[in-house]
């Protein structure tokens, strides 16, 4: 019974990341197929009168999925190309302003964009990886400091901390935390996101957790 339970547990731990990866890939592939559907149907109609065999091949699911992935890659490449040219940056900037002003859409788009930008920024003074107490004292979670603020009445230093969640770090939440209550780390943003996405299985082997307790072998003079 112990061997059966051990193997089932090991199988479950191996299956979970594969399942999550499949969900993400299937979701992206589904979007790509929906996007490429009109293009595929247009190509089938174009080749049907002249090359019926080619049209039948294009109508197959394998061809549709392949064309969908290819179209998605072309769109991503095109967007990347736009961001590296002045005219493209202006067009994307105009689209950004339009989306930001739309009710509800602006909130979702703006929030997602800020999260993605936070992930891309190197861990400097303005964006660093910290630990905050959550969900209750004695437990801590990973957070990204995205902004420094002050209390309007007391001028107490405050930090806006974005807390990414497992397995999708963009579905996290934001907290305003007193600056003295965060525990700074030397982790990079990539370290933190990898740690979160992997459920804690991949990441640095050491982290400063308790800043108040004594370190074994440390004297009062050393602190």
Image (cartoon, rainbow, N blue to C red):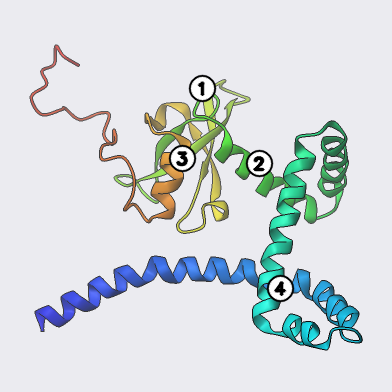
Query: Can I make out residue 209 in this image?
Result: yes
- Distance from Cα at disc 1 to Cα at disc 4: 42 Å
Give the answer, above or below, for where 169 lies relative to 17. Answer: above
Give the answer, above or below, for where 60 lies relative to 166. Answer: below
Residue identified by numbered label 2: 114
Residue identified by numbered label 3: 190
Image disc number at residue 125 = 1
Is 66 on the left or on the right of 181, as rendered?
A: right
* SS state under label 1: loop
* SS state under label 3: helix
Is 48 on the left or on the right of 172, as rendered?
A: right
Mark 1 or mark 4: whose residue is earlier in sequence? 4
Quick one: which residue is furthest to the top in this view? 221
Q: Position of residue 140 (x, y in %)?
A: 35, 44
Q: Are marks 4 and 3 in contact (CB under 8 Å)?
A: no
Mark 2 or mark 3: whose residue is earlier in sequence? 2
- Distance from Cα at disc 4 to Cα at disc 3: 31 Å
Mark 2 or mark 1: whose residue is earlier in sequence? 2
Mark 2 or mark 4: whose residue is earlier in sequence? 4
């Amino acid at each position: 019974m112990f061997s059966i339970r051990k193997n089932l547990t090991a199988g479950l731990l191996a299956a979970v990341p594969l399942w999550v990866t499949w969900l993400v890939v299937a979701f992206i592939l589904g979007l790509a197929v929906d996007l490429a559907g009109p293009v595929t149907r247009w190509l089938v109609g174009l080749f049907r009168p002249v090359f019926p065999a080619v049209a039948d091949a294009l109508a197959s699911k394998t061809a549709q999925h392949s064309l969908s992935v290819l179209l998605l890659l072309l769109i991503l490449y095109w967007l990347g190309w736009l961001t590296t040219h002045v005219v493209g940056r202006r067009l994307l900037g105009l689209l950004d302003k339009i989306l930001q002003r739309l009710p509800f859409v602006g909130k979702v788009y703006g929030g997602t964009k800020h999260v993605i930008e936070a992930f891309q920024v190197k861990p400097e003074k303005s964006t660093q990886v910290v630990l905050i107490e959550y969900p209750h004292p004695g437990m801590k979670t990973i957070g990204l400091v995205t902004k420094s603020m002050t209390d309007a009445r007391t001028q107490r230093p405050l930090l806006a901390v974005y807390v990414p969640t497992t397995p999708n770090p963009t579905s996290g939440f934001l907290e305003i935390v007193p600056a003295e209550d965060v525990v700074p780390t030397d982790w990079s943003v990539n370290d933190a996101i990898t740690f979160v996405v992997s459920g804690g299985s991949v990441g640095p082997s050491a982290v400063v957790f308790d800043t108040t307790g004594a370190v074994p072998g440390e004297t009062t003079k050393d602190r």
